[in-house]
Amino acid sequence: MTGAAAAGPTLDAIKARGSIKVGVGTQPGFFAPDSNGRWQGFFVDFGRALSIAVFNDPDKVQFVSSSPQQRLPALQSGEFDILLSGVTQTFTRATKLGFHFGPVVFYDGQGLLVPKKLGVSKGKDLNGATVCVQTGTTGELNITDFFRQNGIAFKPVVIEETAENQKAFASGRCDVLTQDASDLAITRTQLPKPDDYVLLPERISKEPLAPAIRYGDDQWLEIVNWAVYATIQAEELGITQANVDSFLTSGDPAIRRFLGVDPSLGEAARLDPKFAYTIIKTLGNYGEIFERNVGPATKVGLDRGHNTLWTRGGLLYAPPFR
Amino acid sequence: MRSGPIAAVTLWWGGRSALQATILALVLFGGFLLVSNTLANMERFGITPGFAFLEHPAGFEIGEAPIDYRPQDSYALALLAGLLNTVKVAAVGCLAATVLGVLLGVARLSGNALLSGLVQGYVELIRSTPLLLQLFFWSATFQALPAPRQALNPLPGVFLCNRGIQLPAFADGRAAGWVLAAAVLGTVLALAGTALHRRAGRRGGLPGMTVAAVACGLPVSLLLASGVPLRIEVPELSGFNFSGGTTVSPEFSALLVGLVVNAAAMIAEIVRSGLQAVPAGQWEAARALGLTRGRTMRLVVLPQAMRVIVPLLTSSYLNLTKNSSLAVAIGFPDLVSVINTSANQTGQVLETMAIMMGAYLTVNLAVSAAMNLYNHRLAIRGWR
C-alpha cells in the first residue's frame, strides 16, 4: 500500500472514540432494549456486526433511538456515525441530502393497516378515508401519490410520535394506519385486539431499508458494505453460527478467503482478516439474524419474502469476496 | 450632554470603547466561523443552500388547510397554510384564554371560599404540570369520543365524534366570506351612523331609523346581489365519515382547549395580582359613592388594574403563540409540523429553520407591538 489514505472523518472519529454511534428507531424486533437494557433486534445486529468489523468486539457500539423526524438531520450533524433505523434509500436522500447508503438489509414496502369492520379489501376502496401517518418518513409522500394516482381523496393526520400515532389509530381517529408493512405487522401485534385489524395485501411503494452514512467517508462505507455482505455470503455458503468452525479447515478457496484462513482479503481492507468469521461466530448469518429477531417463530412473525437469497428467488445478493 | 448623530453614536458605544470593539470583533469572527463552517459542510454533503425549493411542488397533503392547498402546490403555499393554522389557533386561543383567565382571576378573589379555592386548585394543577402532558391528555380525551357511526348528537345538526365536531355550514364555500363581509360592512355603517347621529344630534339630528335601515339594508342587498346560495347544509354520515357542514378537527380542538386552559391559569394569576395592586381605598371610595361590587370592579378597579395586567398579558400571549408549536406532537398541521415535513423531504433544514424563526419572530413582534400600543394608551389615560 502506498501510504495510508485518509480514513475519512467518521472512521477516524470512531477509532478515536473507541465505539460506533448508531442511530436506531423504536420497534421491538428491529430495535429495542431488552429487560437488561441491552439493545436487541434485526438492525441492532448489523450495528454489532460493524463493531466486530472495526473493533473485533460486538459491544463497542452505542445505540441511540431517534424519531424518523430527527434522525436524518442528526446523522448530518454528526450525532451518529450511521443510521440503522430503517431508512428508505431514495434518490433525493442520496443525491441532494448528502447520504450514502450501504446494502439494502431489508426489502420492505409501504402497507395499509385497517380495522376489519370497515370491510375494505383493497386500497382503492378507501375513498374519503382518514389516514394516520408519521412525520419524517417517505410514507407521507407515498400515501399522497397513491391516492392521487387512484383519483380518490383522503385526509392525513400527521403525528411525529410513534406511540401517539398508534394510539390515534387504535382509538379510531383514523381509518388507516400507513407505514412500512413490516412495521405495521409489529404494530398490529401491539394493538389491544390484533385480530380486529387486517394488513391489506397491496404494497403502495418500494421501501429498501439500508444503512445510511454521510458523504465523504469512503472507507467507512466499504466497511458497512462488506460487513452486511458477509452475513449474506455466509448464508449462501451454508455457514452458520453453529458450524462456522468446521469450515475453517475447508479446502474450498472461496471459503478460505471468506473466513480469513487465507488472510489476503481482510489485510487489503485494513480490517481484521477474520472479521467475517467473527461476525458469523457471534451473530450468525443473515438468515439466522432474520429468524432470531423477526422471523416466523418470533412474536413479530415476518416471512422472509423478498428478503431471501437470490439463489432461492429472493433479492439478497452479495458481490464476490475476492 | 451634546446632541446630534456623533453624540448618539458615542452614547450607544459607551465608555469602554476598546472593550466594546474587541467584543464586537469576537462576535463577528464567531459568526463568520459559524457561517463558513456550515457552508463548507453543506458543500461536503452536496447540499445546495438556497430558497429555490419554495417554488417546487410539495407533494404532501395537509389535513386541514385554511387556504385552498393541494399536494401539487408549492412548498411556499404549504408553509403559508401551516402559518395560517398557527395564527388561527393563536388568535382564537388568546381571545378565549383572556375571557376565561379574567373570569378565573376575578373568581379567585371572590369572598366565596369554595369558588376561590377551586380556582386556586385549578391554577396550581395547571401551572405544576407540563403543557405537553396536558396536550396529550386533551388529545386522548377527544380521541375517546365515539366513532362517526355512534356520534353524539347534543343539538340538532351538531355531531361529536372522534373525527371532530361536525357543525352545519353554508353549502357553498364562498357564502361564509360574503356573510362575514356583509356583517362587517353593517357594523361599520352602524358605528359610523351612530357617530354621525351623535354629532348631528346637536344640530337637530339624523333619524335613527334611517341609520338602522342603511346599516342593515345595504349589506343584505349586497349579499343578495352576490348571488351566492345561502343554503345551510347539515352534516350527514356517508362512507367513512360525515359529509356536508363543517368539521372542527379533534387535533385543533385538543390544541385549542389545551392552550386556553393552560394560558388561562397564568392569566388568572396575572389578573389577580393586577386587581390586588389597586389600593383598597379605591374599593372603599367606590362603596362610599354607592356603587355595587360589580360596578366597582368594572368601572373603578379593572381600568386601574389593566395598567399592571397588560404588560404581563403580552408575555402570556407570546407564550401561547410559541406553545402552539407543540401541535406537532398531537397531529395538528401547524407551521412547525409543515416545516418539519418540508425539511425532511427537501433536506433544506437550515433554510426551513430560518423561515420558522422569521415567521415566529414576525408574529410575536406584531402581537408585542399591538399590546404595547394598547398599553401606551392606557398609560396616557392614567396620566390625565
Image (cartoon, coloured by chain):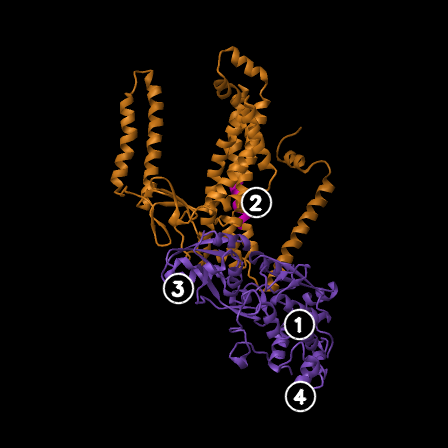
Chain colours: A purple, B orange
Nearer the N terminus, badge 3 or badge 1?
3
Q: Where does the magenta region start and end?
A: B355-364
Amino acid marked by disc 1: Leu
- In the rendered image, residue A301, in percent from the top left (x then y), is placed at 54, 67
Amino acid marked by disc 3: Ser
Mark-to-mark CA distance, 3 and 4: 51 Å
Amino acid marked by disc 2: Leu
The residue mark sitting in front, 1 or 2, is: 1
Q: Quadrant of the N terminus of chain B?
A: top right
Q: Secondary structure at mark 4?
A: loop
The residue under label 2 is B132
The residue under label 4 is A252
Residue closer to the observer: B219 or B96? B96
The residue under label 3 is A121
Q: Chain of mark 4?
A: A
The residue under label 1 is A283
Q: Secondary structure at mark 1?
A: helix
Both on one chain, marks 4 and 2?
no
